[in-house]
Structures are given as C-alpha cells and as structure tokens.
C-alpha cells in the first residue's frame, strides 16, 4: 500500500512599485510587483513550504535563507526544483498540489495554465496534478487594499512514483 503525507504552505508578499510581478514563474504585466529578496514569487514560496511541510523538513527560510546573497533576485521556480529534488532523494513524489492565490488585481485567469505548467515541470509531474486558483478578497483586508498578495498551497506526496511523472 502506498503511503501518503500532506503538507500545507502559506505566504504573503507586499506589493510595491518598480518590481516585476512574478507568480508561479510567470511574469505578469502590472503596475506593481512583489517585494522580496528573491523574485518574491508568493505562489511558488507557498508551494515550497507545503513540500517541506509534508516531510517535516522545516520551511523555505531554513533551506533558502534570505540572508544568503546566492538567493538575491533568484528564480523561485529554481528553488522549487531544488526542493522537489530533496523529496525525490528521500523516495517521495508529488501526488497532487492545490493552491489558491489571493489577489485583488490584476486578473490572473489568462496566466493560470502557464503557472500550473511551470510548477508541474519544476516538481516533475504533469499539469493535471497541479491546480492553481485565484480569488479576490472582495476589496477586504490587505489583499483588497492592493497592499499585498497572499497564497495558500496544499500538497499530497506519495512514497512511490506516480504514473505520468517525469
Ligand atoms: Zn515568500
């Protein structure tokens, strides 16, 4: 019988002018972008935390500290690839991932498939196992005031290679 584990991740970044908006490895044209040491890809950070959480390996700050100049401006999709590699070396694989992005603006629907594909490729699974959803918060809270973007991620991992993986 295969063994499953579940991991959860949550992240928030502040919106600021003069920064690119990168979500799920997709650079999205917008008047503001996310502040952070890396590319501040809030969706991918939540996914990385979910992967580490599934195996109780700490969090993104444990493995990719923002005090390390190696990660300044780096691609978070690259960090996800590294995190997925750590799982694979321990004999674990991603079974499926579900995420929700909370952003008041811009409209994210046109970019969702590319985000799913980027996340799936980085984790070595097909996009059918990766879900990205986007919601506004009805103009409520820091998300609604356009001060930041939040993201939630839940992942299930399995101790044998799922069909269709790469
Ligand atoms: Zn982050």
Image (cartoon, grey):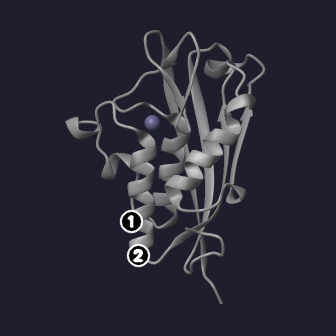
Q: Secondary structure at mark 2?
A: loop
Q: Check whether the beta carbons of the residues at disc 1 and disc 2 lie within 8 A of each other.
A: yes
> The C terminus lies in which quarter of the figure?
bottom right
Residue 92, image x, y percentages:
50, 74
- Eyeballing the image, is 87 above or below 34? below
Which residue in the protein does label 2 denote?
90
> The N terminus lies in which quarter of the figure?
bottom right
Quadrant housing residue 106: top right
Q: Residue at x 53, y 44 (%)?
A: 46
Q: Is residue 133 left or right of residue 35?
A: right
Which residue in the protein does label 1 denote?
86
The residue lying furthest to the bottom in this view is 1
Label 1 beta carbon within 8 A of ligand 1 = no
Task: State whether residue 68 appears in this view.
Answer: no
Q: Quadrant of ligand 1?
A: top left
Quadrant housing residue 137: top right
The residue lying furthest to the right in this view is 138
């Amino acid at each position: 019988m295969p063994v499953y584990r579940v991991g959860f991740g949550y992240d928030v970044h502040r919106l600021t002018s003069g920064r690119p908006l990168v979500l799920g490895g997709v650079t999205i044209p917008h008047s503001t972008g996310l502040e952070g040491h890396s590319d501040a890809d809030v969706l991918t950070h939540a996914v990385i935390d979910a992967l580490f959480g599934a195996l109780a390996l700490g969090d993104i700050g444990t493995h990719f500290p923002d005090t390390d100049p190696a990660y300044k401006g780096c691609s978070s999709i690259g960090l996800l690839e590294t995190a997925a590699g750590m799982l694979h070396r321990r004999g674990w694989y991603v079974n499926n991932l579900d995420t929700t992005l909370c952003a008041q603006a811009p409209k994210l629907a046109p970019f969702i498939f590319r985000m799913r594909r980027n996340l799936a490729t980085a984790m070595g699974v097909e996009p059918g196992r990766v879900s990205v959803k986007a919601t506004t918060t009805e103009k409520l809270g820091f998300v609604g005031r356009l001060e930041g973007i939040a993201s939630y991620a839940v992942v299930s991992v399995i101790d044998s290679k799922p069909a269709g993986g790469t």
